[in-house]
Image: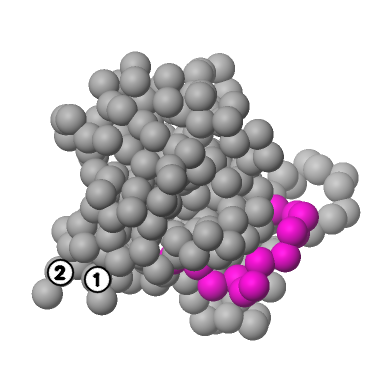
Amino acid sequence: MKSASRILLISNSTVYGRGYLDHVEQEIKAFLGEGKCILFFPYALYDRDGYAAKAKARFAAMGYSLEPVHHAADPQKAVEITDAFFIGGGNTFRLLKALQDVDLLGAIGRKAKSGVPYIGSSAGSNVAGPTIKSTKDMPIVQPRSFDSLGLVPFQISPHFQDPDPNSKHMGETQEERILQFLEENETPVVGIREGAWLICEYGAVTLKGEAGARIFRRGEIPVEAKPGENIVDLVGGPNGN
């Protein structure tokens, strides 16, 4: 039985030379359809009101109403009645801790797995996986655990950057850090380059955008994925249970 989940995971909300969500506007419209009211989670940034105002204006320009969850009198009820979710980017540790503090992980997970559309960008994509262990962010706060929404059975590594063979920087590359993750964990990791995103629905995990992605699995050589490919056989599909 195919999952009811409909999940859009965006590497980054802004690409160089373009405005906020411009590069993925048509995908968001196709994904959501018409007349949706979006519940926005600005928890990954410190200035929640400023972030919410930015997102509200951008979604209004696309024809959607958007309300920030931190303004809701009852966040649990807001989750139950919304038409769709958008969890924005910022610091993944701060985002996860906030979701835990207001006890929203379970409620969001249940609604998303029932078919309520979920859009994540950057940190919002990170928390769609089983844990946030593959984030690049600094742990500026300490969540109770690293377990997140588990909407998909693979880890996300947004803003993926390929190693620069000409760089003199001696620190670890993003690829090296992902390989270290796989020394301790079994879960596949999708390194999504900026300008790319995943559509997870109807039993498929389709890579879209222009930049492609790199897929890492324990004990195997990393695989390059191109836009338009269904990578479900490499990473598994959306979780419907």
- Frontmost residue, 121 versus 98: 98
Mark linked to residue 2: 2
Main secondary structure found in the magenta portion? loop
Q: Residues within 10 Å of mark 1 (few under 14, many from 20)?
A: some
Q: Nearer the viewer, mark 2 or mark 1?
A: 1
40 left or right of 34 in image: right
Q: Evaluate whether residue 197 shows in this view.
A: no
- Magenta extent: 137-149
- Please state, as top left, top right, bottom left or bottom right, where the N terminus lies in the image: bottom left
Callout 1, which amino acid?
Gly
Task: Verify whether residue 144 appears in magenta.
Answer: yes
Q: Is residue 182 left or right of residue 65?
A: right
For this rendering, which residue is in front, 139 or 83? 83
x, y percentage for residue 43?
A: 57, 46
| Residue type beneath disc 2 | Lys
Closer-to-camera residue (175/239): 239
Q: CA distance from mark 2 to mark 1?
A: 7 Å
Relative height, residue 2 to residue 165 (above, below): below
Crowd tier of the residue under label 2, counting other residues whose Cα lies within 10 Å: few below 14, some 14–19, many 20 or above: few
Which residue is depicted at the point 43% across and 20% down? 57
Q: Residue 204 versus residue 58: which sits nearer the camera?
A: 58
Q: For the C terminus, which image quadrant?
A: bottom left
According to the picture, the residue beneath numbered tag 1 turns out to be 240
Compared with 183, 226 (above or below) is: above
In primary-sequence order, the first of circles 2 and 1 is 2
Pointer 2 with pointer 1, Cβ within 8 A: yes
